[in-house]
Structure formats: structure tokens, C-alpha cells
Image (tube, rainbow, N blue to C red):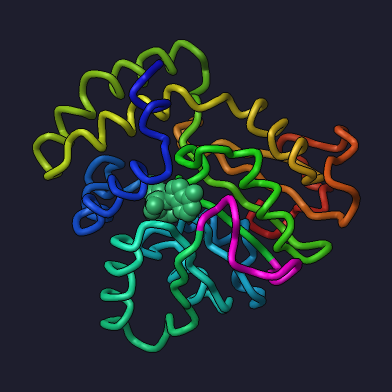
Amino acid sequence: MTRAQLDRRPADVAAMFDRTAHRYDVVNDVLSLGQDRLWRRAVARAVGAAGGGRVLDLAAGTGTSARAFAAAGATCVACDFSLGMLREGMRRHRGVASGSAGVSFIAGDALALPFRDASFDAVTISFGLRNVSDPLAALAELRRVTRRGGRLVVCEFSHVRPRPADLLYQRYLRRVLPLIAGLVSSNPDAYAYLAESIMDWPEQAEVARLLRAAGWSAVRWRNLSFGIVALHGGVNDGAGPASRGSGDSRDSLTSPAAAPGW
Ligand SMILES: C[S@@+](CC[C@H](N)C(=O)[O-])C[C@H]1O[C@@H](n2cnc3c(N)ncnc32)[C@H](O)[C@@H]1O
């Protein structure tokens, strides 16, 4: 069993993020060479935040994405079970101008969300699903709190294409990323976990299957930065718990999930 699997125990994961909260966003910027900002913009477009509505940003961390959704026009709830990350997010939020006023920070567990059924027009989770102890249960819980016709966007590290490039990328994850993290982070262990959890995470098609198994329909995905990150999307068609297993597409323009950002 790898460290990533061992450490996905909820209390360990929350404690690890509590410890990294202070420098979390800076280290992200450094390790991704600023790409994380592009990824977040793509998520905001896919969520359709500019159209307004109520958006849940689950595993929101310090609320970096949530602030972008709110700035685009949505009312956003940023939910996370790491109080350290939420506190850091609220501290920064207080210092921000009124343009991103529409964010509430709420403590909650992805596996038992503190929201009523059908409370949100769109739900999203960035770099969080990989850390949840039961991703399928979290996806089903996300669907429960989404209104009929509402949309899911998952942004997660993924697998680089073409495949030979993925081998190079895995080398970078194993050897280089922990070295850089050792220089810029006070908690390099968290970044060893990051590398292992990315390599453990299933490929794009498998994640799409997970969404369908949780009942999402019109499932689709799109690679960003050659697959370093993938966006997966789905729609809550209001049918029973598991969907029919068809109708997912890759880069299709006809899916009901087709917000302008897709
Ligand atoms: C890598 S951070 C991502 C934060 C933010 N979404 C972002 O894009 O920067 C992962 C977050 O998932 C949260 N998390 C992991 N498991 C969770 C769970 N079961 N319920 C709520 N939050 C969870 C962690 O506390 C952490 O803040």
C-alpha cells in the first residue's frame, strides 16, 4: 500500500491541509509554473459562473476558485473539512474588495454535506476528489445537493497524453517535484503525498465511469495542459441513483453539459 492510500484517512488529510494552509496557494503557483491560474479560469468557464446562480465549491481549500466564481457573478459556498484552509481563506477574503463578496465559507465533509437536496445550480470540486476517502460516495453526495438539470465540474490532476510523455511526467513527479517542494514548502511530506496520489489516481476514462456510477449523466471530459489536469463534467438529469451508462462523450459540443466553457 502506498503512502497516498494510507494517508487518505480523513483526519490525516484534514490535518495535512491544516499544516499547509498558510503557503498553499504560493506553493501551487510555483510548482505549476502559474498554470494553476489557467486551470482555474477553465473551471470557472465550465461551471458557467458568469451566468450567476448558486455554486458549491467542495474541498474549496482557501477558496481561490470560489472567489473567481463569485467575481464572475455566482453566489458561491466554499466548503471544506480543513478548518485551517477555511480560516486562511476567510482571512484573505476579508481583505478583498467587494467584487468577490458572494462567498460563504462552510465547514463540511464531502461524504455528508451539510446542505439540503437540490440546493445548488452547479457543484464543483478542484484538486479535491483525489483526496477524499470514498470518491464515489462524494460524487453521489454532490449529485444529491444539485438541482435537476444542474451541472458538475471536477478538476483534477490526471494522466498526460501521449502515454510516453506520461512516463516522463511520472519521473518528474517522483524525483523533481519533491526536491522543489523541499525548497519552497515547510511541509515537503505533503508534496510527496501529492506526487503519489496523482500517480494512484485513475485515468480520464475511469474517472468518467465513476461519475456515471454516481448517477451523473452526459458525462464528458477535456484535458488541460496535455492531461496534467482533466476537467470532467456531468449533468444531474434527476433520474434514479445510477445513470444508464451511455451518453458520455469526449469534447462533444452537443451534450447538455455544454456550458460555454466546454
Ligand atoms: C489540494 S486541496 C484543493 C483546494 C482547492 N479546491 C484548490 O483548488 O486549491 C484539497 C482540499 O480537499 C479537502 N478535502 C479532502 N477531503 C475532504 C472531505 N472529505 N471533505 C471536505 N474537504 C475535503 C482538503 O481539506 C483540502 O483543502
Q: Is residue 2 above or below residue 102?
A: above
| Residue 237 at least partly seen | yes
Using residue 101 as the reference point, say whether residue 187 is left or right of it: left
Q: Main secondary structure of the magenta part?
A: loop
- Expressed as whole percent of the image width and height from the top left, the position of residue 225 reads 46, 36
Which residue is at the far bottom? 98
Write the residue at 74% across / 66% down: 117
Q: Is 111 in front, or is 27? A: 111
Q: Is 219 in front, or is 104? A: 104
Instruction: Please tell me in which quadrant of the rendered image residue 127 appears.
Output: top left
Write the residue at 64% across / 65% down: 48
- Expressed as whole percent of the image width and height from the top left, the position of residue 182 reads 12, 34
Q: Which residues are magenta?
A: 109-121
Q: Indicate yes or no whether the magenta region holds residue 51.
A: no
Q: Is residue 154 above or below residue 46?
A: above
Q: Is 9 in front, or is 4? A: 9
Write the residue at 59% across / 66% down: 114
The N terminus sits in image quarter: top left
Q: Is residue 47 above or below residue 9?
A: below
| Residue 38 at least partly seen | no
Using residue 220 as the reference point, say whether residue 238 is left or right of it: right
Instruction: Please tell me in which quadrant of the rendered image residue 101 appears.
Output: bottom left
Report the number of numbered marks. Answer: 0
- Expressed as whole percent of the image width and height from the top left, the position of residue 255 reads 82, 48
Q: Indicate yes or no whether the magenta region holds residue 119.
A: yes
- Expressed as whole percent of the image width and height from the top left, the position of residue 238 reads 87, 57
Write the residue at 58% across / 76% down: 74
Which residue is at the far left? 183
